[in-house]
Amino acid sequence: MDIILQILSGVFAPDTMSAMLGASLLGVFIGALPGLNPVMAIALLLPLTYSMDPLVALGMVAGIYNGSMYGGAIPAILLRIPGTPAAIATTFDGYPMTQRGEAAKALKIACWSSAIGGTASALALMTLGPLLARGTLYFGPAEYFWVAMFGMASIGVMVGRDPLKGLIASVLGLLLGTVGLDQLSGTPRFTFDQPWLLGGLDLIVILVGLYALPPVLQLAEAADLKGLPASALRLGRVRLTRADVVSLVPTWIRSSLIGIGVGILPGAGGNIAAFLSYNAAKNRAPDPDSFGKGNPAGVAAAECGNNADNAASMIPALTLGIPGNVVAALVLGALLIHGLQPGPQLFSQAPDLVGGFMVQMLVTSLLILAVGGAAATRVFAQVQRLPGVMLVPTILVLMAVGVYVINGRLVDLWLMFGAGLAGYLLEKLDVPLAPIVLGLILGPMAEQGVRRALLIGRGDPMSLVNHPLSAIIALATLGFILWPLLRRLKPRRPPAA
């Protein structure tokens, strides 16, 4: 009972609530601007959290995440331009509703659906997270090694269109994670006699470079000098009727369950949850032909599904150290900044912080109802009138200042720009960036686990799989790696005559 009171007092403290409210507003703003995304915003935020209270910092992350996932629906509905990748399915029925003169109603449905999906996801995190954490207390060094390998293999295979490129990205992240002093012997590795590399590559500098710079370069590449005219963004007032709400309840329940299930799977993401929820709503509807022509249930399903992924993706991140998506990987980075190691020990080391973050995911989901409805129709839709080129220098300055204040080293700026250019080129080559970050985060965990397991087993390789749990995780990892190869080797049926 004492820990619950401590969690609630921390979350509802004035500074924490102000941070969540401001971050939720900022998140809607970011989601409403095509080209910006929550990953870039959180990557920019992380360097600034060094001097913050950890709970305040995590509250800002939660606010930006939930707010931006709703904000992506604004341009998707008004302009048929998804503000975030997860809002692609929202365009299918949202834009036809706008063409019918029902833009305000579509935005209102998106707002309610986002809040309901995010709330259900947060409740799942609060109930399933501690249960899974208790199960992982039985893990030893070998199990931790295989969990890390499973996380990198699953992310590498499931993210992007080419599993081979994903696995190559995972290996690249592993290589980056070996830079610095050896964790067990203290021997310098790949430091090239540079003292600043003895501590390894700074995770936050790499994250800011990989995820914040490529979108900025793409904005500069687009060279948008005009923005949108005010006449394209005039909206009226609307209220959802009781009949509207009743008709959407089954869609909200179904989409929430789908989004939570997808969120728990590493690497799946909100865009997959949105498409699955949309297809499920269409298949269960009495009039499936109306989908794609302005059916409100299509907007509700897509927005509820992609927001139900949000907190659920934190379940494997907080309990196993395996992020369900890129934002969850950034949350792990935020925890590492404040000296907290993600994994099952986190629930015993800092229960007030973990519990507080879970409650913050719930509170910021509900804040969407407060900041999303009127704000979307009166304020945030208007941010799309800003020319894209105006954002480029502003974001570059924020990136440079945020990275420099971490260690006060100019070399970090060069490292950030190097990582950003590499990320930009890798995206052009269709190589996913998430496995690189995951390799950088999980690489040290995997190395410690395998070396300790071998020391305990006196060098016997079978010590890595001599327990049933470690053997099961090893087989699952092998299955993820071999599945794309087996799928390619499967003989194709000859075309029908």
Image (tube, grey):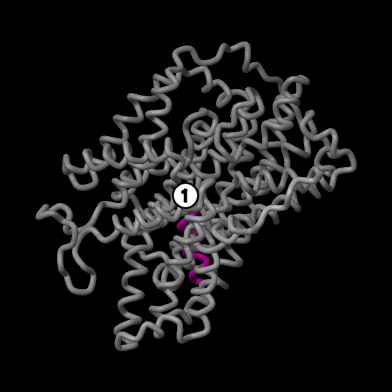
Looking at the image, which residue sits at the far left? 193
| Magenta stretch: includes residue 12 | yes
- Residue occupying the point 54% across, 30% down: 32
Image coords of residue 462 (percent x, y): 41, 85
Q: Residue at x 62, y 11 (%)?
A: 231
Q: Is residue 83 something one can see in this rendering?
A: yes
Residue 211 falls left or right of residue 497? left
Q: Name the residue under label 1.
A: 326
Q: Main secondary structure of the magenta part?
A: helix
Give the camera-side residue of 339 and 187: 187
259 falls in the magenta region: no
Q: In this view, does 95 lie to the left or right of 441?
A: right
Name the residue at 67% across, 35% down.
Answer: 90
The vertical placement of 98 against 107, above or below, is above
- Indicate the position of residue 312 as horizontal and vertical percent values: 58, 57
- The N terminus sits in image quarter: bottom right
> Would residue 322 be found to the left or right of residue 271 on screen?
left
Give SS at disc 1: helix
The C terminus, quarter of image: top right
Q: Nearer the viewer, residue 353 or 321?
A: 321
Q: Where is residue 421 in the image (x, y as percent from the top left)?
A: 32, 36
320 in relation to 170, above or below: below
Q: Residue at x 21, y 43 (%)?
A: 412
Quadrant in the picture for residue 214: top left
User: Between residues 253 and 90, which one lies in front from this camera angle?
Assistant: 90
Residue 13 visible, this angle: no
Within 10 angstroms of label 1, few (less than 14), some, or many (20 or more) residues? many
- The amino acid pointed to by label 1 is Val
Number of marks drawn: 1
Residue 249's x, y, as percent? 80, 47
Q: Give the range drawn in magenta.
A: 1-14
